[in-house]
Amino acid sequence: MSKTTSMLAIWISLISNIVLTAIKIIIGMLFNSQVLIADGIHNAGDVIASATAYSSMRVSSKPADADHPYGHGKAEVLSAFIVAIILGGAAIYMGYHSIHALFEPPGSAHIIAFIAAVISLIWKQVLYIYTIRIGRKMNSKGLIATAYDHLADVYASIAASIGIGLALIGEHYGVGILAYGDPVAGIVVSFLVLKLAYGMGRESFDVLMERSVSTEHIEQYAALIRSVPEIKRIDRLRAREHGHYILIDARLAVSGKLTIQEGHDIARRIKMKIKEAYSDVDEVLVHLNPWYEDKGEAKQKGLFQGQKTKE
């Protein structure tokens, strides 16, 4: 799956968000649907989010240069963080206007508004499945953020459909309280989207702060390193996400009697072994420490995540 596929997915998302924004806001204003208007405003934020993701994916695909020796992968993480902020703002906006609508006379629901909400639900569900599959396959933070943005819209459209549907039922059977289904649904949506925004923002922030990858991944890398016979001890092993790829730093002990060429070959073999096993690993930096048999193995083996020996 190529980078072109990712860019196509983001373009489809961008165009879809523009079309859905126009449909929801126009129909929402014509038929006085608070939840549909709020959802339309949310979609307007999605347009900005999709455009941000597109720009970041173009930047992140650039090769490393003198100013950015580790590449531009964090551009996608930064865009995901921006998307999270946009989602949070949209959630607060939706919640405020939905609560405000509860203290006003309810408007009359219309079947056209209900149909628009259902169409948005189906459309966004298809977009979510499409973008999340490509995003996970490419390990693209920007595309995954866009997928979760679509998922937030799915929540919003479900609530909008239920809210408008309850209002229509209330009008048909003369149950006045159901007329407030529209704004109540808007409040529910705002909480769901806010929760999604928080989770996405926290994950992006952790990557920007260079949080280590999971212990499980560290152990997997360590197992591959230990499979190289010449490795006597792992003194330090660290790994961090850098956008859509991972950087690994390893400090390893080998026999101090090896030549520089032999040490170089061992380090190269370890790099190739890890990169072949894990396609998301972009760089493996290996530092070799001398190990002598007469010292024994009193020092602890397998020190990870920043722990180190005196070598």
Image (cartoon, grey):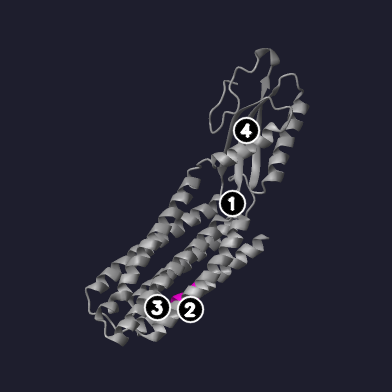
> Which badge, 2 or 4, is on the more N-terminal residue?
2
Is residue 44 within the magenta segment? no
Residue 100 at x, y percent in the picture: 25, 71
The residue at the point 43 percent across, 67 percent down is 155
Q: What is the residue that sits farthest to the front in this orientation?
A: 173
Q: Which residue is mark 3?
A: 25
The residue at the point 75 percent across, 25 percent down is 260
Q: Secondary structure at mark 3?
A: helix
Task: Say left or right for 107 vs 47.
Answer: left
Q: How far is the residue under mark 3 from the one under mark 1?
A: 35 Å
Instruction: Name the residue nearer the viewer: 148 or 47.
Output: 148
Q: How far is the residue under mark 3 from the one under mark 2?
A: 14 Å
Three-letter amino acid code at disc 4? Ala
Three-letter amino acid code at disc 2? Ile
Quick one: quadrant of the N terminus? bottom right
Residue segment shown in magenta: 17-21
Q: How far is the residue under mark 1 from the one under mark 2?
A: 33 Å
Residue 119's disc number = 2
Q: How far is the residue under mark 4 from the one under mark 3?
A: 54 Å
Mark 4 nearby-residue class (10 Å; few <14, some 14–19, many ≥20): many
Q: Secondary structure at mark 2?
A: helix
> Which badge, 4 or 1, is on the more N-terminal residue?
1
Instruction: Name the residue nearer the viewer: 286 or 227.
Output: 227
> Which badge, 1 or 2, is on the more N-terminal residue?
2
- What is the total number of numbered labels drawn onto the structure image? 4
Q: Which residue is mark 4?
A: 250
Quick one: quadrant of the C terminus? top right
The residue at the point 44 percent across, 82 percent down is 115
> Which badge, 3 or 1, is on the more N-terminal residue?
3
> Which badge, 4 or 3, is on the more N-terminal residue?
3
Residue 65 at x, y percent in the picture: 63, 47
